[in-house]
Image: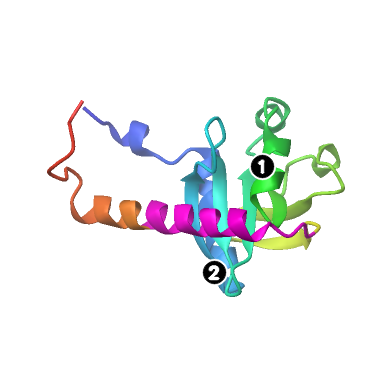
């Protein structure tokens, strides 16, 4: 049985909520926990009004950041890459050649724009399709948490 404690958002999820709110202010739509390829899961993917693909990794602590050894693998799946951290995070740990967003559960601010590295057209198409399917599946799961036709494990 789920308890209120087990359903409380984790610090990284709280950051992600603020990041998603902030991205909406820039006319980006977002999804959380998208898998661009096997072995990688981005915290937030933003899709801009012109098809821009941004990846934002949320780090809730120094230990959380130090244990992330896969972040460079995300670079080939986006046009811009950002870290999102709270105001108390030691930002000097973060690579200068990446974007930086300071956020909390209610919003955020882009402090440093991530450098642009345009995706090849075929990869962009694939990422937009993954974004659309991910978003549609999330929406559908709210309306029908136990869809028929799927094997229940």
Q: Residues within 10 Å of mark 2 (few under 14, many from 20)?
A: some
Q: Residue at x 26, y 50 (%)?
A: 141
Q: Residues within 10 Å of mark 1 (few under 14, many from 20)?
A: some
Instruction: Inspect this view and state whether residue 15 appears.
Output: no
Disc number for residue 119: none
**Extreme front residue here?**
122
Q: Residue at x 63, y 65 (%)?
A: 52
> Circle 2 is placed at which residue position?
24
Disc number for residue 74: 1
Give the quadrant of residue 88: top right
Q: From the image, which quarter does the C terminus lie in?
A: top left
Residue 44, position in %: x, y?
Answer: 55, 50
Give the quadrant of residue 117: bottom right
Q: Is residue 117 magenta?
A: yes
Residue 38, position in %: x, y?
Answer: 52, 32
Q: Nearer the viewer, residue 9 or 141?
A: 141
């Amino acid at each position: 049985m789920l308890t209120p404690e087990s359903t409380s958002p984790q610090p990284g999820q709280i950051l992600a909520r603020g990041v998603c709110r902030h991205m909406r202010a820039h006319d980006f739509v977002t999804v959380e926990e998208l898998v661009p390829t096997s072995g990688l899961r981005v915290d937030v993917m933003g899709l801009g009004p012109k098809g821009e693909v941004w990846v934002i990794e949320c780090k809730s602590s120094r230990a959380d950041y130090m244990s992330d050894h896969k972040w460079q693998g995300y670079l080939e799946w986006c046009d811009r890459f950002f870290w999102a951290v709270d105001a108390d995070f030691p930002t000097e740990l973060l690579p200068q050649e990446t974007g930086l967003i300071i956020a909390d559960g209610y919003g955020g601010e882009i402090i440093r724009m991530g450098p642009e590295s345009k995706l090849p057209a075929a990869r962009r198409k694939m990422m937009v399709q993954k974004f659309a399917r991910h978003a549609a599946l999330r929406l559908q799961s709210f309306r029908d948490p136990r869809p028929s036709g799927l094997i229940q494990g």
